[in-house]
Amino acid sequence: MKIGKLCVELSSQPVGLERVGKNIIVGCMDQTLQCYTIKGKMLWTVYLSDSIITMSVMDHRQKGFKAIMVALNNGDVQVYRDKYLIDTIKTDSAITGILFGRFGREDSSLIMTTRRGGLSIKILKRNAVFEDKDFARVLLQPRIRSSTSQRRQSIC
């Protein structure tokens, strides 16, 4: 009989656990999002602005797009592709449940339940395009933008 061994030791208690490709992404109570390989090697850690309530995978098979959605206590839903934040959805109340998938005839729907008992449904446009150049633009854009305006040059 083979005895198992401890593969991963987390920094705090887990809130959610999702598999994306060959990696496992864990949301912890210390406001971190951690990624591990199947063998237990830590790849990266992202520090979040608030505590995690719930998390889910956004898997759009037709477009070949996978991301992690993390609902925070302040009402934000952050969408991460790998360790990069690609979008934030602001809501009035904290999100307690989140799921992306088929809803009725629509294949790409985001269903969210709120702490106050509300239900929010967001439907992704059918002609939405997820391209690598859009992902690269998100990675390359500066986090802090200067408030100075750019000069206009006229050609005579």
Image: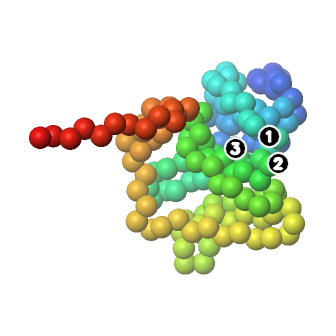
Alpha carbons under labels 3 and 1: distance apart: 19 Å
Q: Mark 2 belongs to which amino acid?
A: Asn
Question: What residue does disc 1 label?
Answer: 50
- Closest to the observer, 59 or 147: 147
Alpha carbons under labels 1 and 2: distance apart: 6 Å
Q: Mark 1 belongs to which amino acid?
A: Asp
Disc marking residue 73 = 2
Q: What's the residue at 54%, 48% (across, down)?
A: 66
Question: What residue does disc 3 label?
Answer: 18
Instruction: Name the residue furthest left.
Output: 156
Disc 1 vs disc 2: Cβ atoms closer than 8 Å? yes
Q: Mark 3 belongs to which amino acid?
A: Glu
Q: How packed is label 1: few (under 14 Cα within 10 Å), some, or many (20 or more)?
A: some
Q: Is residue 128 left or right of residue 89?
A: left
- The count of marks equals 3
Q: Position of residue 142 (x, y in %)?
A: 50, 32
The colour scheme applied to this rendered structure is: rainbow
Disc marking residue 42 = none
Asked whether the viewer can see residue 68, the reply is yes
Q: Is residue 119 left or right of residue 23?
A: right
Report helix, strand or loop for mark 1: loop
Report helix, strand or loop for mark 2: loop
Q: What's the residue at 49%, 56% (across, down)?
A: 61
- Closest to the observer, 42 or 39: 42
Q: Is residue 26 left or right of residue 65?
A: right
Q: What's the residue at 25%, 38% (across, down)?
A: 153
